[in-house]
Image (tube, coloured by chain):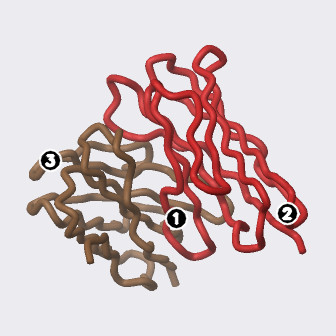
Chain colours: A red, B brown
Amino acid sequence: GENVEQHPSTLSVQEGDSAVIKCTYSDSASNYFPWYKQELGKGPQLIIDIRSNVGEKKDQRIAVTLNKTAKHFSLHITETQPEDSAVYFCAGVTGGGNKLTFGTGTQLKVEL
Amino acid sequence: DGGITQSPKYLFRKEGQNVTLSCEQNLNHDAMYWYRQDPGQGLRLIYYSQIVNDFQKGDIAEGYSVSREKKESFPLTVTSAQKNPTAFYLCASSPSRTGKDGYTFGSGTRLTVV
């Protein structure tokens, strides 16, 4: 089955700086990679996703890049703001799979 | 508005009791999932269902049970056999049985054993 590893587990940045979270996956047949943001005491919310036929996707200050050869994908947040502070989870699903496999999460703290 | 609703938000259980957590969705999604989240930890899959009247065990199914009698409902029962049930429980649904269109999560139920 799919295995997804996520780094770093915690990340502190200054407001206005960029933040990058990286995930690697094991199954070369994986073809869908979403990112979720979880605020304290709430359920995760989908913030961006990418499919294997695309190398990069952007949505305002958020972007995701996918390197199929190296089997890794990354979340990039530019011009970070305090409200970006949360736990971020990456996930993947294989071509023949029927559920998402989640990374272990990254606690992002944006400091003033 | 379409969404996924978990209730109650907070639940207290005495040792030896069974409790049932509710999860209802009006998104017409085929697949539904239950996850457990411990403090500072990731998401661990308990059970999932891709179609009515069918469900599969996840990675940590022991001590839990589910049913899927209706498309919109996927209740989770935490039985007395679950030795450490205190956790945050998340329900999710997906329009795709493969999960390839992402999940919509509920707001969670925090279960505490007293």
**Is the same chain shared between marks 1 and 2?**
no
- If the image is split into quadrants, where does the C terminus of chain A sit? bottom right
Which marked residue is nearer to the observer: mark 2 or mark 3? 2
Image: B93 above or below B108: above
Q: Secondary structure at mark 1?
A: loop
Q: Residue at x 64, y 52 (%)?
A: A62
Q: Is residue A76 above or below residue A74?
A: below
Indicate which disc residue B51 carries.
3
Between B101 and A11, which is closer to the camera in this rendering? B101
Residue at mark 1: B84
Left or right of B9: which side holds A82? right
Q: Are marks 1 and 2 in contact (CB under 8 Å)?
A: no
Tag 1 near tag 3, CB within 8 Å: no
Q: Position of residue B72 (x, y in %)?
A: 16, 65
The answer for how far apart the CA atoms under marks 2 and 3 are is 45 Å
Label 3 secondary element: strand
Which is nearer the N-term, disc 1 or disc 3?
A: 3
The kind of residue tagged 1 is Asn
Q: Residue at x 11, y 52 (%)?
A: B52
Q: Which percent across, then down, holds residue A98?
A: 31, 35
- Chain under disc 2: A
Which of B18/A75 is in front?
Answer: A75
Q: Position of residue A45 (x, y in %)?
A: 49, 62
Residue at left offset 42%, top offset 61%: B82
Q: Which residue type does callout 3 highlight?
A: Ile
Residue A29: image quadrant is top left
Report in which chain the residue with disc 3 lies.
B
User: The disc numbered 1 marks a residue on which chain?
Assistant: B
Residue to which mark 2 is pinned:
A16
Amino acid type at circle 2 is: Gly
